[in-house]
Amino acid sequence: MRHKIAAAVFAGLFSLGASAQVEIQWWHSMTSVNGEWVNDLAKDFNASQNKYKVVPTYKGSYDESMTAAIAAYRAGNAPHILQVFEVGTATMMASGKAIKPVGEVMKEAGQKFDPSVYIPAVASYYTAPNGQMLSFPLNSSTTVFYYNKDAFKTAGLDPDKPPTTWIEVAQAAAKLKAAGHACPLTIAWQGWTQLESFSAWHNVEFATRNNGLSGLDARLKINSPLHVRHIENLANMAKQGLFVYKGRANTAEPTFVSGECAMITTSSGFYGNVKKNAKFNFGLSTLPYYADVEGAPQNTVIGGASLWVMGGKKPEEYKGVAEFFSFISKPEIQSASHKRTGYLPITTAAFTLTEQSGFYKENPGTEVAPNQMIRKTTDKSRGIRLGNYVQIRTIEDEELEQVWAGRKTAKEGLDAIVKRGNELLERFEKANSKK
């Protein structure tokens, strides 16, 4: 009896100890192999200590999770950490007390936090004009070019020599089609890959005011002769069956993994999925460019997402958030994540560690993403930070779809994006200029 009482007391104490863990709710938008990665990050952190427990929860696509978090904040039950894609940055920056700057969170928790250790192009994008880092980079990515080496070989193309210019892409697509491929080229995240990254890669403005980084009064400039030329070329490829549009966001990606489409421009964060699920040899290369454009190629822009800390939480909870961020910042954690997913190693130490491990030599093409981002940036290529950009991305999708379907010319479609997008930018400027 005495032993049973002692066991019960011990069990009760153990239960109290377990329940004393501070839970940190983390809402994210990662699916498939990247969803497994996010869950493992939380699992490894939880196993490394017993004071805090990070609980990752999938809340839908990026725009869905962002909308859900805003509603939850108003209702008083927002998560502690919210994963937000890069186009939501300006909106989050303008959300006032709804967020708590990550620099502030780390400082108050006594955690070492030095923004200078992050890859400059990553750190600067998530940093306010006063120099304070607002969100924590998690799955930073950039645009890369994937191609099916087996399909290239079948079409008589050199599988070890991917196309680097858009002219070469069109030529490769023609050979692939002649060899029987119904989908030589497709694209994912079309606004990001074909307008945003395209602009930075060619060192031309996407929008005024340094692409929005220098002020709220930025306006779109993507109906320039170069942008029209590129979208017109893609539209002509669509008419010839060389480029096949497969839908918005990343819905085109499965068509590459399945082997249906032989080439795709999309996120470096697609690498883990391709590596695990593709049944063919594949290669990675840089984003194609136009060789006659002075200054090209320059550098691509950041994609992916960062972690924002929501406001109104308890000090002890913020300490848990800070410890988690410190844990996933470790070079060995960052390097392992980069190797697994294709997302950028967000610190220079992680990049160096990956390089020293021989990973890039053993996996040719995996160095493309960091090399594209580490290049020196210009005022035209540092990144794009615009208000209401989630809605502007939808406008880009709508208008480009009209072009691919042949219902609008490239210039008409781009003019419409600029007109409709600028109306949203003006609205955002008026709503936030007095804050």
Image (tube, helix red, strand yellow):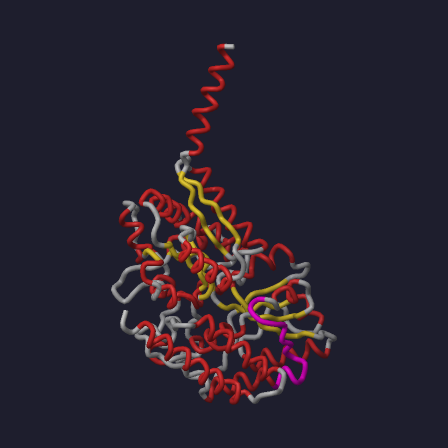
Q: Position of residue 50 (x, y in %)?
A: 42, 35
Within the magenta stretch, is there residue 242? yes
- Locate residue 303 relative to residue 256 in the image: left or right: left
| Quadrant hosting residue 302 | bottom left
Q: Which residues are magenta?
A: 236-250
Q: Residue at x 48, y 84 (%)?
A: 227
Tell me which residue sits at (43%, 38%) in the image: 48
- Front one among 403 and 257: 403
Front-most of 330 and 88? 88
Q: Is residue 79 magenta?
A: no
Residue furthest to the right in view is: 180
> What main secondary structure does the magenta stretch of the protein show?
loop
Q: How far from the left and from the top, in percent, is residue 434?
A: 27, 72
In the rendered structure, the answer to whether residue 167 lies left or right of residue 305 reads right
From the top left corner, tell me how far across and down residue 176 is, in percent: 68, 76
Q: Residue at x 41, y 81 (%)?
A: 422
